Image: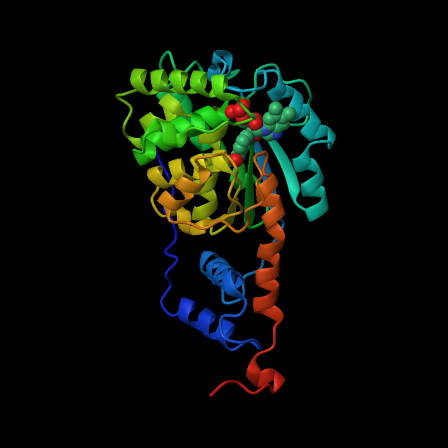
Amino acid sequence: MNLPDLPALAEPGLAARVQHAIDHKTKPLGALGRIEALALQLALIQGEEIPVLREPQLVVFAADHGLSRRGVSAYPREVTPQMVANMLAGGAAVSVLARQQGLALTIADCGVDALLAPGAADLRIAPGTADASAGSAMTLAQAQQALSNGMALVERLPGNALLLGEMGIGNTSSASLLMQRLTGLPLADCVGRGTGLDDAGMARKLAVLEQALAVNAAALAPLDIAAALGGFEIVTMAGSVIAAAAHRRVVVVDGFITTAAVALAEALRPGVLAACVFGHRSAEGPHARWLQHLGVRPLLDLDLRLGEGSGAALAWPLLTAACALLADMASFDSAGVSNKD
Ligand SMILES: Cc1cc2ncn([C@H]3O[C@H](COP(=O)(O)O)[C@@H](O)[C@H]3O)c2cc1C
Ligand SMILES: O=C(O)c1cccnc1
């Protein structure tokens, strides 16, 4: 599998020059807090002293999951194509937020069973994965195809920012399996309530996921893990993350499931994390732990547990604000304001 090389983000001198510019803006040193760190990160991703965000693209990667027939979600499998239709018709949370924030919205069909409406980008591999509790969710060839589909999608999209979203009933299960295999944490620490399972549902989900890990025990290398435990939308998204990082595009991560795609991308191509801004901490139980494990801090903490890209869209104005402040704030010198001694 040919994955692109990543650019070196630690260009000598650039970080120091940008930090110097930030430190000489008209404010007490460090007073814009994490927005300053965000501005610096955006500058390093783009390799520019003054980063500019152009034509942001929010992509909802959608697919069905074999596991969704095993009672691991509070909602039925049919919701996936129904919500894709709702997204295309403009009525989903992500549709509203994308419109409101001026984000171009693409719905990518990576393998939805019985798609109801035209208008989705066709990255379809099969009508849903196989049941991961009974064997591999997909073949190695399908995983490779998903990665190349995701990379090709980024090549076709304009702009320099990719916001991640997803739709797929059962996909918190796939994300939990990936978290367990990629981090080595106990399964119980990797599983949450998804769309709102009650205690009995949680016990069922845990038992099914135990089975999935056991039957896929031999999958230990990143690509094997992707095939065994992934969903078509998650692996396709991982391909898009790798291509975006290779092209110095900013990646805005949403919740638990998009974090799974990023963690998988990082396992396949170490270094992509540097291109990722984590939009929010999801209320999905294990998300905080995974973010900690990856050593990243999300921008927002709003108790969201929706997915779709909603948290990435809500975080977006902070990125544009960071760029505007770096570009337009006066310095102590230019404004004639006295700096501290
Ligand atoms: C109406 C509806 C809209 C959604 N939008 C996103 N999700 C979210 O819930 C699903 C994951 O949770 P689980 O693993 O428990 O199925 C994904 O489709 C995710 O995007 C939704 C779920 C529902 C029911
Ligand atoms: O954090 C997420 O991405 C999430 C959580 C619950 C359900 N769907 C998505």
The image quadrant where one finds ligand 1 is: top right
Residue 214 in view, yes or no: yes
Residue 333 is drawn in which quadrant? bottom right
- Observer-nearest of 324 and 8: 324
The percent position of residue 338, horizontal first and vertical second, equals: 56, 87
Give the residue at the far front of this rendering: 199
- Observer-nearest of 159 and 257: 257
- Residue ID at (66%, 42%): 104
- Observer-nearest of 48 and 285: 285
Determine whether 237 is above or below 41 in the image.
Answer: above
- Residue ID at (50%, 67%): 49
Left or right, 270 with reference to 251: left
Residue 108 in view, yes or no: no
Left or right, 97 with reference to 163: right
The percent position of residue 283, horizontal first and vertical second, equals: 52, 37
Determine whether 206 is above or below 300 in the image.
Answer: above
- Residue ID at (51%, 64%): 33
Image quadrant in which the N terminus is located: top left
The percent position of residue 95, horizontal first and vertical second, equals: 69, 36
The percent position of residue 241, horizontal first and vertical second, equals: 46, 41
Determine whether 68 is above or below 334 in the image.
Answer: above
* Colour convention: rainbow
